[in-house]
Image: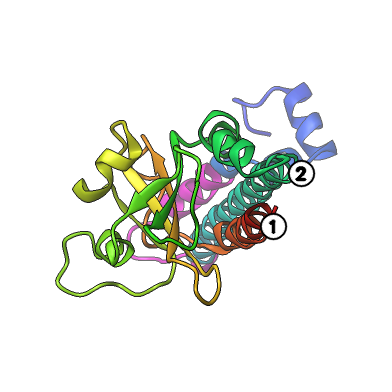
Amino acid sequence: MDAGLDPETRARLIAEPEAILSDRDLMRALVDAREADLGANVIDIRGRAMEALEDRLQRLESTHETVIAAAYDNQSGMAVVHRAVLGLLECADLPEMIGALQSDIAPLLRIETLRLLIEETPHLPGLPEDVAILPDGGAELVLAAGRRAPRGDDIQLRRAAIVTEPVHGRRVASEALIPLDLGRDRPRALILMGSADPARFRPTHGTDLLRFFAQVFRLVLLDRLRT
């Protein structure tokens, strides 16, 4: 028996060997001690296999944690959007809906600004003053944000542009622009969201939840425009 190992510890390890097997540091120390006994000219294949398994386990654990974090973020984001949608549906008319965007809906979405932009048209007279009125062709200019060619009519996530700063009415770091199709003979419209967090709206982020919010927003807006 090893003089450095007291009988009580030895008996416990014999009774519960999983105490060592489940401890990476102890297992690594045992493997290192074994390789030291073998000498520099002998390679212990079991030790190398253990190293490979450890690396693979660490990668799997990292992937698992990433997947769990992403699932939690998706669930949290879905709950946020659902609360915002309920807030839209509770608005009785167009003025109440437009007024609630900045005061009620934006905090629910955890953003700093939320505005509706509509190109000027005689077909929609008497819009609430909180609606940002754009000149004819203004939606395309906002989407282009100074570029020579627009990026299309899809949802855009980007750093805040100078052209939208007056519409936000405050300093934001990132923004989302969501085109709305209001139908034939109606002007082009956009939802503009702004966040103080530069990482909130990045081009690499998914847009499924924003697309769902926009679809509900469009239906509610069209219904309020008819009333």
Q: Quadrant of the N terminus?
A: top right
What kind of secondary structure does the magenta stretch mostly adopt? helix
Q: Image height check: is 118 above or below 149?
A: above
Magenta span contains residue 33: yes
Q: Nearer the viewer, residue 40 or 62?
A: 62
The residue tagged with tag 1: helix, strand or loop?
helix
Number of residues whose C-alpha sits closer than 10 Å to that of mark 1, classed few (under 14), some (14–19) or many (20 or more): few
Viewer-closest of 14 and 202? 202
Q: Residue furthest right?
A: 15
Secondary structure, mark 2, is helix
Q: Quadrant of residue 179?
A: bottom left
Q: Is residue 16 left or right of residue 58?
A: right
Q: Residues within 10 Å of mark 2 (few under 14, many from 20)?
A: few
Does the magenta segment cover residue 43?
Answer: yes
- Please report contact status of discs 2 and 1: CB closer than 8 Å, yes or no: no
x and y percent of residue 169 in the render? 32, 33
The disc placed on residue 18 is 2
Q: Residue sitting at 40 percent across and 50 percent down?
A: 201
Q: Nearer the viewer, residue 55 or 190?
A: 190
Expressed as whole percent of the image width and height from the top left, the position of residue 22 reads 69, 44
What residue would you read off at disc 1? 223
The answer to whether 61 is drawn above or below residue 165 in the figure is: below
Q: Nearer the viewer, mark 2 or mark 1?
A: 1
Q: Position of residue 114 (x, y in %)?
A: 47, 41
Kindly identify the residue that appears in the image at 80 percent across and 30 percent down: 12
Q: Quadrant of residue 13?
A: top right
Which is nearer the eye, 176 or 77? 176
Please name the amino acid that badge 1 sits on: Asp
Magenta residues span: 27-46
Mark nearer the N terminus (2 vs 1): 2
Q: Is residue 76 above or below residue 64?
A: above
